[in-house]
Image (spheres, rainbow, N blue to C red):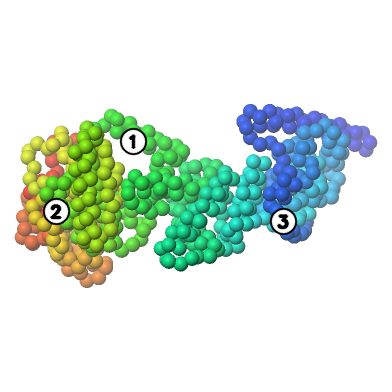
Amino acid sequence: MRERQQGDYAASREDFLHARRSATLHKVWANLSGRHNTLIPFEDLKRTLGSAGQSYRGLQPVPLDKIIGSLGRSDDFDRAFLPTQNQTRGKWVSVDSAYHQGVSLPAISLYKVGDAYFVVDGHHRVSVARRQGQSFIDAEVIEVQSRVPVSADLTPDDLDVLAAYREFLDQTKLDELRPDQDLLLTMPGDYRKLIEHIHAHKYFVDRDQDRTMSWEEAVTHWYDHVYAPVIQAIRRNDLLADFPERTEADLYLWIIDHAYYLSQELGQSVPPWEVAKDFARRFSRRPQRLWSRIKERIIQMVVPDEFESGPPAGTWRNERLEPRNEERLFRDILVTLTGAETSWHAVGQAIEFARRENGVLHGIHVISRERSEDEEAVEYGREILCQFSARCTDEGLPSTTSLVVGDVAQTILERTRWADLVVINQRWEHGRLAERPLGTIFQTVAAQTARPVLAVPGVRQAEPPQQIMLAYDGSPKAREALFVLRHMVCLWGCRGIILQVGEGDASDRDRELLDQAWQYTQDCGKIDVVTRYERGVAGDVIPRIMGEERADMLLMGGYGRKPLLKAFLGSTVDRVLRVAWFPVLICR
């Protein structure tokens, strides 16, 4: 028996030497990698938490990997509870020998704060248990209440953040007003920014409502109407995966700053979910998003605008409509302004949409880079925007204006990201040769944007549409146009005509396609929609039927062919636009 005890003691001494060597290696690696390798002193954490109540939780098994700190002995062990001092050898070897001999040792004593534990008594038992590969250890636990979240990955640097968080809660009482709140930041100074946000929010609400809110009311109003919607957008778009090691509150501050940047650039406010998506698109560190940005830049440098293909059908609804869940489809209407007399017809048609959709009109005039130093061009652009604003004011409609320098087509395309509808003046007739090798600026925008584009001919003043015809072929883009037709017929009180054009007599498949489209429009109730089937070439038949039905507006799916193929073979959209005396709403 004595020889066995001596053998266990020798093995325990060897275990201690291995543990010390491991501690040294851990220290070297921590210095090289910049990672923390120290235990959290409970005394420091307690000062951070301030006065806090305690509750005895009894004897229970505790995960060893959640024991991250110590009361009074944080210098004797590292984060993995490996011994860092030789003077601990005697006690450590004694405990390890007992482990080898199967001797039961008393339970240790721990403080529990949040999800983390701190050793009060039993440091050597914890060290030996971890060295021997145990996962749990029995402990008597006293829980210390905390107003701020404490996790098992807490580092000494985090104490400053938790102290600032506690001061923030002392000022706002948000943990009492909204118990489910989580505003953990990674930089302690950012809590001052949150306080500033609340003060600014209180100022504007007091001014708008002509009253003075209490501080507690201002805190909850800010949390419910500003902070919470942004957090919902962050979660909906899974943005934490795009920015590892950041918190939701960090992203809130970034997105609020980005929202201000966008509002200054665009001259309009942008909903939180769209700001969040744009922020991730521009700045995400996720590999697929990085690659997407690189690919986009390569395409912009190498591929001419006219050769680029547009986004998949249905992108508009996924990006703009579903999160809003509103009846109105066209809340933000982008209107391109040239100053030509015919372009004001496009403005008139945009106004008709804005009236019916309770929308906001966003006028944009783009000056090419070549003319950016031309004072007359700049002054002319300002005059156009002033006329646009005046007209919107006369109509009682909200509006914004933007004067931008850049490539005309690319600038308009970029701005369409923030619109539900793009309204562009379209000349009544085109020559055989387009202004660009593969099409006009209008065609470039219409082919590449995900948003519906309303082409307005400059031949007559805008009138409220009474009869709307849809050119339908069952394609994904035509189905998007069918979605818009149903909306306009249901809410605008218009009559709808669904036209299908084929090369021969209508087949069973053609009749089924038309019947399905008609049934889809009837989902919102009995509305006035008829169907027609006509033989011939679509580009010729569509204008003829528009005249026969005395329709006011045409809905079509967007360009179907690839850009290069379209350049050689043409498209139904282009054929119709060349002779159209009516507005054409092109959907994607």
Please provide percent x and percent y for residue 134: 73, 43
Tell me the amino acid under the disc marked 3.
Ser
Label 3 to label 1: alpha-carbon separation = 54 Å
**Is residue 18 depicted above or below 153 in this figure?**
above
Question: Residue beneath label 1, please?
Answer: 296
**Tags 2 and 1 in contact by the CB under 8 Å rule?**
no
Please provide percent x and percent y for residue 463: 13, 61
Looking at the image, is mark 3 or mark 1 earlier in the sequence? Answer: 3
Q: Which residue is drawn at 14% across and 64% down?
A: 466
**Is residue 529 depicted above or below 436 in this figure?**
below
Q: Which residue is drawn at 83% across and 31% down?
A: 86
Location of the N terminus by quadrant is top right
Q: In this view, does 88 lie to the left or right of 408?
A: right
Tell me the amino acid under the disc marked 2.
His
Please provide percent x and percent y for residue 272: 41, 53
Q: Nearer the viewer, residue 167 or 418?
A: 167
In the rendered image, the residue lying farthest to the bottom is 526
Question: Residue beneath label 2, please?
Answer: 345
| Residue 347 appears in the rendering | yes
Labels 2, 1: front one: 2
Q: Is disc 3 surrounded by few (<14), some (14 to 19) or many (20+) residues within 10 Å? A: few
Tell me the amino acid under the disc marked 1.
Glu
Question: Residue beneath label 3, please?
Answer: 51
Q: Which residue is drawn at 40% across and 48% down?
A: 260
The answer to which quarter of the image holds residue 525 is bottom left
Dot 3: element: loop
Q: In this view, does 528 lie to the left or right of 276?
A: left
